[in-house]
Image: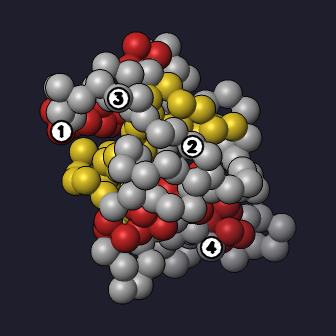
Amino acid sequence: MHLGKPNDGAETGRVPKPASSRRLGVPMGYRGRTMRSKPKLQISAGGALLRGTAATAELLVMRRRARVFELPKGHVEAGESLQQAATRELCEETGVRNAPPAAGPIGTVLYRFDGRPPVRKRVHFFLFVGNATPLELGPRPKGIRELRWIRHHEIAGLPLQSENLRPILISAFNHYRAMADPLADEPSAGLR
C-alpha cells in the first residue's frame, strides 16, 4: 500500500465499507444500501365515548397537538385486557372519572412510524356509552389542549391525527345508533 493514497481494497480483494457506515455503525446490505430492521408491532387500545340519544348523539374527541383531533388511546400494560386498557386510557386522557364499561369493539387502526427502530402500532378501539349515569369530568389532563363533543355531521370536516381514524368515528356513531332504543328520546345526563 502506498502512503497518502486511500485504500480502495485492491490489495485485499475486498470492497471497503462506505465511510458513512463505518462512522455510524449502520449495518449495510447488498450494494451498500442501509438494512432496515423489521418494524416492531405494538398493541394499543382506545375508546370512543358517546352520549345522548340516537338523534342527538355526541362523541368526545381530544386535541393534543396544535390543530388535529384524536380519540384517547395508549399501550396495553402487563396483565391488562384490551378493554381494560381502553377504559384506563379514556379516563387518563379525558379526565372522565366514572367511565362506563366498554360496550364492544368498533374497529382497529394500524399506524406505522418510520423511526429508529421502525414501529407498527395496532390500536383496538371500543365504544363507551355515557348515558346510564351522569359523567364526571375532572380537570383537563396535562398535555391535552382541548376536549370537544362532536356530532356525526362534523366528522367530515374534523382535522384528525390520521385519516385512518375517520372510519372509526363513523363506526362509533353507527354502533351507537344500532344499540340505541329508537323509542327513547330523553336527553343525555351529560358531563357534570
Going from N to C along the chain, the mark reached first, 2 or 3, is 3
**Label 4 with label 2: CB-CB less than 8 Å:** no
Residue type indicated by callout 1: Met
Distance, label 2 to label 3, CA atoms, is: 15 Å
Q: Is residue 96 left or right of residue 43?
A: right
Assign a secondary structure to mark 2: loop
Residue type indicated by callout 2: Leu
Going from N to C along the chain, the mark reached first, 1 or 4, is 4
Residue type indicated by callout 3: Glu
- Residue 21 horizontal/vertical position (percent): 61, 65
Assign a secondary structure to mark 1: helix
Distance, label 1 to label 3, CA atoms, is: 15 Å
Mark whose residue sits in front, 1 or 4: 1
Residue type indicated by callout 4: Gly
Going from N to C along the chain, the mark reached first, 2 or 1, is 1
Going from N to C along the chain, the mark reached first, 3 or 4, is 4
Nearer to the camera, 90 or 167: 90
Q: Residue at x 73, y 41 (%)?
A: 145
Q: Is residue 96 left or right of residue 35?
A: right
Judging by the rendered image, the residue that carries numbered circle 1 is 179
Mark whose residue sits in front, 4 or 2: 2
Going from N to C along the chain, the mark reached first, 1 or 3, is 1
